[in-house]
Amino acid sequence: MKKVLIVAAVLAVVIIVPQTLFTVDQTKQAIVLQFGDPISTHINPGLKAKTPFLQSVITFEKRILTSDPGAGEYLSSDKKRLLVDHVSRWRIGDPLRFFQAVRNESGGTERLKAIVFSEMRAELALHPIVDIISGKREQIMETVARRVQPKVASFGIDIVDVRIRRADLPAEVLNSVFARMQAERDREAKRYRAEGEEQAAIVRADADRQRTIILAEAYNESQVLRGDGDAVATNIYAEAFTQDSEFYAFLRSLEAYEKFLPQDSTLVLSTDTELFKYIVSPRAPEQE
C-alpha cells in the first residue's frame, strides 16, 4: 500500500509541478493566461508559479527585434522617384499591451511595417533626393523614428531606430539619369574644348604678332645696317677713286665681268665697246 502511495505521489509531482512552476529566461518576458485572458505579467527572469491546468504561459522576446520589410518606392520633394530599403529595430516594451493589441511578434511586425512605411513616405516627401542620399539621411531617419514611436506605443512597442540600408533610383529612372549625366559631361567636354581652342587661338595670334614685330624690327635693323654698310662702301669707293681713278675703273670693270659673264657662257660684242677696253688693251687710253 505504501508503495502505491509513493508512486502516486511521484506521479502527482511529475505531472503537477511542471503545470505549476515555470521559468522566465533573462532574454524573455512572460504573460500568464487563464482561459485566454491575461492574468499576470512577468518581466524579470526567475522561477514563477501559476495555477496548474487552468493557466498557461506565453513568452515574448525581450531583446531587440529587427523588421526588414524590403524596398519601397517613395517620392522626394523634387518629384524624384526613389527605391528605399529600410530596416527598423524595435523591442516589446509592454508585453501585456502588445499581446492585447497584436497578439504575437508577427502581428507586431505587420503593424510596425505599415506605420513606418507611412511615416517614411510623409517625411521623405519633405526632402530633395540629394538630402536623402547624402549626410542628412541620419537626421531624416531620426525624425521618422520620433514620429513612429507615439503611434506604435499603443501596441506596446518601443522603436530603437529606423535606418536606410540602401537608396536607389528605379531602373527606368537610372537609365534617364545616366543619359542626362552623359549629355552633361559631353556639354562640359565641348565647353572645355571650345575654351581650349579659344586660348590656343589667342596664343597663336599673340605668337604671330610677336613674330611679325620681330621680323619687322629685324628687317628695319638690317636695312639700317645695309644703309650704313653702303655708306661706308661708298666712302671707301670715293676714297679709292680719288687716289687712283684708273685703277678704280679697272676694278669696277672686273666686277662687272664677274657678274654678267657667268661660267661657260658666250657673249658676242664689238671690241670697240667701252666695256672691253681693258681686255683689248691692258692700259686704257689716257684721258685728255
Image (cartoon, grey):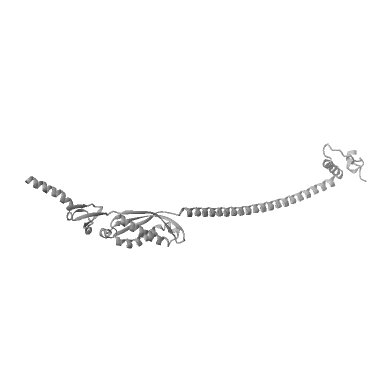
**Percent of width and height locating residue 233:** 79, 47
Q: Quadrant of residue 34?
A: bottom left
Q: Residue 164 or 109: which is nearer the viewer?
A: 109
**Percent of width and height locating residue 93:** 28, 58
Q: Is residue 246 above or below residue 159?
A: above
User: Is 233 positioned to the left or the right of 102 in the image?
Assistant: right
Q: Which residue is at a point 75% across and 51% down the rendered structure image?
A: 223
User: Is 128 positioned to the left or the right of 93 in the image?
Assistant: right
User: Is 177 positioned to the left or the right of 64 in the image?
Assistant: right
Asked whether residue 281 appears in the rendered view, the answer is no
Q: Residue 28 or 20: which is nearer the viewer?
A: 20
Q: Residue 270 or 101: which is nearer the viewer?
A: 101
The tally of labels here is 0
The residue positioned farthest toward the left in the image shown: 1
Q: Quadrant of residue 77?
A: bottom left
Asked whether residue 152 appears in the rendered view, the answer is yes
Q: Is residue 210 above or below residue 247?
A: below
**Percent of width and height locating residue 31:** 23, 57
Q: Which residue is at a point 11% across and 46% down the rendered structure image?
A: 7
